[in-house]
Image (tube, rainbow, N blue to C red):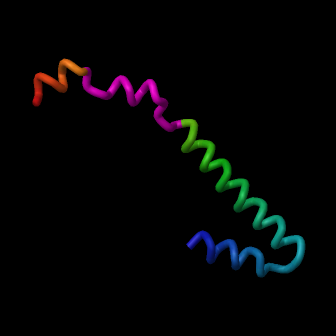
Amino acid sequence: MIGFVVFKLTVLSGVLAYIATAVAIVALVIYAVVLMRGAMTAQDIAEELQSETELVSTA
């Protein structure tokens, strides 16, 4: 779907195509940055893992 929208934006005439495409690219980059800022870190994942003693006692 994103590819179709980008195709339609680039079919617009002249400067309007550049503006619309630039806005779409900036929006996608901002979306990616927001997702990366909310991503878990290695420390968060390590805290969620069971300890070695917990693993042995559940086996």
Q: Is residue 3 magenta?
A: no
Quadrant containing the C terminus is top left
The correct choice, above or below, for 2 with respect to 25 in the image is below
The quarter in which the N terminus is drawn is bottom right
Viewer-nearest residue: 51 or 29: 51
Return the residue nearer the eye: 59 or 37: 59
How many numbered marks, from 0 up? 0
Q: Per the image, is 39 magenta? A: yes
For residue 8, which quarter of the picture? bottom right
For residue 27, above or below residue 5: above
- At x 81% / y 72%, what residue is drawn? 17
Seen in the picture, residue 35 relative to 52 is either above or below; the reply is below
Residue 17 shown left or right of residue 57 in the figure? right
Q: Residue at x 46, y 29 (%)?
A: 42
**Range covered by the magenta-colored residues:** 38-51
Find residue 53 and report its image quarter. Answer: top left
Instruction: State the residue lying farthest toward the right.
Output: 15
Is 14 left or right of 29, judged from the image as shown?
A: right
Residue 16 image position (x, y, % from top left): 84, 71
Residue 28: x and y in percent read 65, 55
- Give residue 36's position: percent from left, percent from top: 57, 41
Residue 54 screen position, x and y as percent: 18, 22
